[in-house]
Image: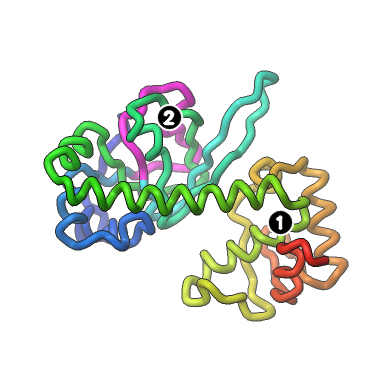
């Protein structure tokens, strides 16, 4: 069970914090208020293990500040990063609604502030409110479509295209006012994962990822400064991401 925190200074309440979470941002205020009754704040320091694969799914999380890494272990004992949710993201919700165990482990990458939604409280809230249940179904279906799109990107594109897509998504996430548009040239983003974890997230080896970075840099599409990447030619990156070059 996660260690709960009192209401942090950055948010007036759990209901207020839910407005910053993509999954809940379109909920009607009344529905969000009823759902907030199942939520509590959790402060988690870097490297903290939130749960392990196979553990009972006691609830799901929304990231308000910081970043978390979801990973699975291969039979050989190697960790494979499968997702890195950051501010506004939700994770582990599928296991909770199925009433099963967590399919992956979750470790905090940097000091984080999370919302934890208790499974039992959540089910009681939804069971007594058909409108809230329908709203949650719609939101989860929308999230599933986004995950399918991400899966297609990972499985159907070459590593440079996956990397270009990831850099453009980072720019959109870090510059929300440009969401839906290509970032301006000279936009700088910060890689949100260590290169080893990013490589497994993109379905590549660290060596292949390094070659892809160097390739994009040699084409003068990006400029690399450690974990900070300047997008010199976003339109060119978009062409790489679409497999046009």
Q: Is residue 233 left or right of residue 120?
A: right
User: Percent x, y for residue 113?
Assistant: 36, 50
Residue situated in front as seen by the camera: 88 or 193: 88
Look at discs 2 and 1 and give the one toward the viewer. Answer: 1
Q: Residue furthest right?
A: 218
Looking at the picture, the colour scheme in use is rainbow
Question: Which image quarter is the C terminus in?
Answer: bottom right
Q: Residue furthest top?
A: 75
Q: Earlier in the sequence, mark 2 or mark 1?
A: 2
Residue situated in front as seen by the camera: 139 or 121: 139
Residue situated in front as seen by the camera: 193 or 94: 94
SS of the residue under disc 1: helix
- Residue 129 on the magenta segment: no
SS of the residue under disc 2: strand
- Residue 128, located in which quarter of the rendered image? top left
Label drawn at residue 200: none
Question: Which image quarter is the N terminus in?
Answer: top left
Label drawn at residue 51: 2
Q: Residue at x 63, y 30 (%)?
A: 79
Residue bounds of the magenta highlight: 43-61
Up the image or down, 243 lies above or below 80; here it is below
Q: Is residue 150 left or right of residue 19?
A: right
Q: Residue at x 58, y 62 (%)?
A: 170
Q: Which residue is mark 1?
A: 163
């Amino acid at each position: 069970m996660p260690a709960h925190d009192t209401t942090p200074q950055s948010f007036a309440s759990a209901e207020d914090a839910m407005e910053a979470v993509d999954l809940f941002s379109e909920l009607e205020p009344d529905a969000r208020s009823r759902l907030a009754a199942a939520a509590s704040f959790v402060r988690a320091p870097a490297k903290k293990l939130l749960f392990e694969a196979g553990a009972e799914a006691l609830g799901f999380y929304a990231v308000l500040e910081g970043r978390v890494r979801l990973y699975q272990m291969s039979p050989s004992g190697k960790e494979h990063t499968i997702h890195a949710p950051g501010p506004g993201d939700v994770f582990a919700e599928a296991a909770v609604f199925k009433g099963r165990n967590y399919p992956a482990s979750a470790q905090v990458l940097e000091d984080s502030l999370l919302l934890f939604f208790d499974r039992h409280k959540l089910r009681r809230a939804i069971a007594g409110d058909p409108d809230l249940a329908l709203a949650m179904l719609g939101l989860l279906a929308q999230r599933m479509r986004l995950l399918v799109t991400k899966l297609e990107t990972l499985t159907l594109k070459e590593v440079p295209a996956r990397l270009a897509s990831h850099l453009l998504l980072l720019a959109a996430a870090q510059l929300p006012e440009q969401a839906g548009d290509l970032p301006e040239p000279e936009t700088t983003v910060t890689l949100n994962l260590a290169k080893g974890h990013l490589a497994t997230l993109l379905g590549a080896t660290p060596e292949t990822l390094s070659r892809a970075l160097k390739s994009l840099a040699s084409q003068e599409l990006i400029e690399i400064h450690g974990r900070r990447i300047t997008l010199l030619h976003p339109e060119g990156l978009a062409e790489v991401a679409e497999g046009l070059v």
